[in-house]
Image (cartoon, rainbow, N blue to C red):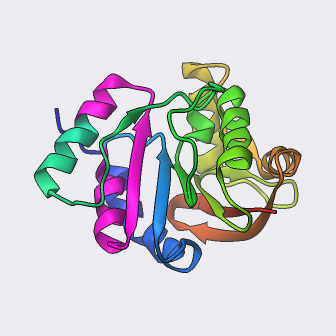
Amino acid sequence: MKQSAPPALRNRQPIAEILESELPESGLVLEIASGTGEHAVHFARAFPALQWQPTDPDETALASIAAWREEEGLGNVLEPLLLDAASSDWPVSAADAMLCINMIHISPWEASEGLFAAAGRLLPQGAPLVLYGPYFEDAVEPAESNLAFDRSLQQRNQAWGIRRIEDVDALAEKNGLKRMRRAEMPANNLTLVYRKM
């Protein structure tokens, strides 16, 4: 039941260092597409004053999250919820921050549209939506590894692929959010921080 993703072990600490200066001191963090659950328990341990709400659209992932949660015994990790980001019907009515790691490129664009629409609905003014993953930028030469990764994603599913930051920014603005930070991360990834205006 409990699964492990090597990238989660590699990137969790660099992401935590960004979150330290972006998350509120207390409240509920809604994590979208939590995957194995390793990020959820790591961040919940790092930020004990925050409640962590993991979600995923996949039943196998939900079982893994539940197994990690049970093993770690952290009181601030809530029971994982089934959530399809592309849906307009979310099982959460409010959050103090949102986090989405490695979903935008491994999902149809409709999932990103749903994510930002929900951020516009659920977040209070000034609250962050934090994204992590690979992105293309108009003014930045793409890494060859990201070009190859993008090709492999589209071979697996034509609706997947690395997104342009400019398109994500436009989607954010349409839903009342604005990008406030771009941080370079290991392995040609970026962390993008949007805030509700």
Q: Find out whether residue 58 is within the magenta segment.
A: yes
**In the rendered view, does 128 fall on the left or right side of 57?**
right
As drawn, the residue found furthest toward the left would be: 71
> x, y percentage for residue 192?
67, 62
> x, y percentage for residue 148?
60, 39
Q: Residue at x 87, y 47 (%)?
A: 170
State which quadrant residue 36 falls in.
top left
Along the viewing direction, whichever of 22 and 138 lies nearer the viewer: 22
Q: In what quadrant of the picture does the C terminus appear?
A: bottom right
Q: In what quadrant of the picture does the N terminus appear?
A: top left
Q: Is residue 18 above or below residue 189?
A: below
Q: Number of labelled discs?
A: 0
Q: Is residue 7 above or below residue 92?
A: below
> Which stretch did the figure color magenta?
37-63
> x, y percentage for residue 3?
22, 39
Q: Find out whether residue 137 is within the magenta segment.
A: no
Along the viewing direction, whichever of 116 and 158 lies nearer the viewer: 116
Q: Is residue 164 above or below residue 108?
A: below
Whether residue 3 is visible, yes or no, is no
Along the viewing direction, whichever of 48 and 188 lies nearer the viewer: 48
Q: Residue at x 49, y 77 (%)?
A: 25
**In the rendered view, does 13 fall on the left or right side of 32?**
left
Along the viewing direction, whichever of 49 and 188 lies nearer the viewer: 49
**In the rendered view, does 75 fall on the left or right side of 135?**
left
Q: Residue at x 24, y 32 (%)?
A: 63
